Amino acid sequence: MKMALVAELQDNTTSLLKLLERVAEAGGKVLSIGHDREPTRREVVAVTVSMDIDVDNFEDLVQEIKNLGILIKSSGPSVELPITLIILIGEVFATDIKDTLDRLMKVGADVKKVEARIKVPTSTVSLSLETTQAKALADILDVAKQICKDKHLLMIRS
Amino acid sequence: MKIALIGFGSVGKGVIDVLRRKTGDLKKYYGVDFQLTTVYKSDGGLHNEKGLNLEQVLQTNYKQNPSWKENFTVGDTLEDLNCQIVIEATPTNIQTGEPGLSHIKKALGSEKDVITSNKGPMAVAFRELIELARRKNRILRYEATVAGAVPVFNLVRESLQGNNIYGVKGILNGTTNYILTRMTYEHIPFKVALREAQDLGIAEANPTYDIEGIDAACKLVILANSIMGINVGFESVDRTGINEITPESIELAKNEDYVIKHIASIENNKLEVAPRLITEGSPLSIGGTLNVVSFKTDLAGEITVVGKGAGGIETASSILNDLINVAQIRGEAKRF
């Protein structure tokens, strides 16, 4: 079964290697690895590892990684979700678009594409977002909704 | 079967016209003879115990009609009126449901079956009215309250029995669909598309109810209560209008093969009316003034119906279906 976990690792190859070794020992076949580097507040990186693995072995694997002192931010079935498109309308730039993107990425959104039509005062921006976790998608949309409420933007989602 | 009609606007006139046109077919195919004996207006009514002349009702000024009776009002006469079915087609008030709500209660309370196209009473007091109908052993039908001519409630009642419906999504307002369709194909801003719709009579002079999603929200509440058994009111709908949609957003949506539609949805027991990105070419991307309703079911999968959501004759079509249905249940009409 396709499963995924998001682990917070020290930003070096040794940490990642140790994690991947555990995956191999548990009988998992790694399908993809994604990185989400935090801004330089601390040298950590959230790594998403998607794998093909027996469900029982996956649960044991997650526990083993936790026992090593590694923080698991989320774990569960990996769902191939289509790209989620959201369109924001309003003072998207004047209300700090970097902050908007950072807040979305913090909850697991992988921003694949940004397209903008800039006008004053109302701009229109489309964001193509990807995630491999169904729960994360719901969280992303909730956060996007809150951002729009805070910044008085209209959000149109797919 | 004797019928009383409350309301003489476009829907009321549509009902009379449809009854006039279909008299022969109703007799031939269903063995039923509907007699419209009363048409109520706010200041009086047309009444003839033997049945009104439908042609005359439509053609002549109602006060010059020999059947016109001043002060023959709903309040004074409905309770004791000799009729089996009341059609309530007065204008909608979504805050109080009145005067339609009182009309329906009076009719059910005086042992009459009721058919309505009036969203207000059904959105404001759904459970109360259903319970009243049940207690009085009366039939209450409201197909015409949502999506005009499109069969929604009857579809679920007759043809999706045994299915669990766990989601509903659709375009329930033809005005906003028209505006967004014009914005999409003509690349015009919202205000221009709205003005065009108003010039054509598709949008009201005050279009608030449509463009702010109030009309769609009302219909969604009826769907939620009726089809999904969710006890909710208008205030539970998360509502966003279409007036801030920009031509640029439509263009960006199109770049990713989407169109923007004003979608009313019930998902995970949450009710929402909002602009949404809909895949181009999918059933929900229908254009013009059409309405569309899509049900997510556990056995039949996704079932979608499309059709005209408004118009006197179109709405009367749903009322006529309900009329025949009531007559069949009461043993006064045969199945086709």
Image (cartoon, coloured by chain):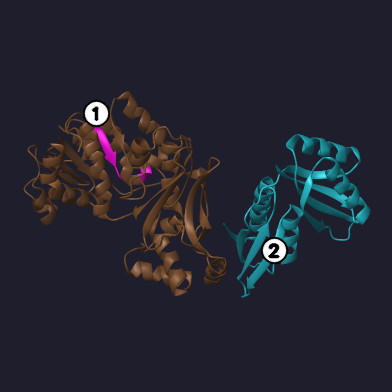
Chain colours: A cyan, B brown
Q: Give the left or right position of residue B26, taking residue B200 as reference.
A: left
Crowd class of label 2 (few under 14; some 14 to 19; many from 20; radius 10 Å): few
Specify the amino acid type for callout 2. Lys
Estimate the x, y position of residue A81 in percent, counting from the top left.
64, 52
Residue appearing at x 21%, y 52% in the figure: B14
**Label 1: chain?**
B
Which quadrant of the figure has residue B203?
Answer: bottom left
Q: CA distance from mark 1 to mark 2?
A: 64 Å
Crowd class of label 1 (few under 14; some 14 to 19; many from 20; radius 10 Å): some
Q: How many marks?
A: 2
Location of residue B160 with respect to A111 vertically, above or below:
above
In the picture of the structure, the residue carrying the numbered disc 2 is A112
Q: Quadrant of the C terminus of chain B?
A: top left
Which quadrant of the figure has residue B83?
Answer: top left
Specify the amino acid type for callout 1. Ser
Q: Which residues are magenta?
A: B110-120
Estimate the x, y position of residue A38 in percent, counting from the top left.
84, 58
Task: Using the rendered image of the protein, determine whether residue B36 is visible from the camera's viewpoint.
Answer: no
- Give the SS element for disc 2: strand
**Label 2: chain?**
A
Q: Nearer the viewer, residue B79 or A26?
A: A26
In the picture of the structure, the residue carrying the numbered disc 1 is B110
Location of residue A45 with respect to B237 vertically, above or below:
below
Residue appearing at x 39%, y 37% in the figure: B160
Is residue A59 found inside the magenta-colored segment of the image?
A: no
Q: Give the left or right position of residue B66, taking residue A14 as reference.
A: left
Q: Nearer the viewer, residue B280 or B228?
A: B280
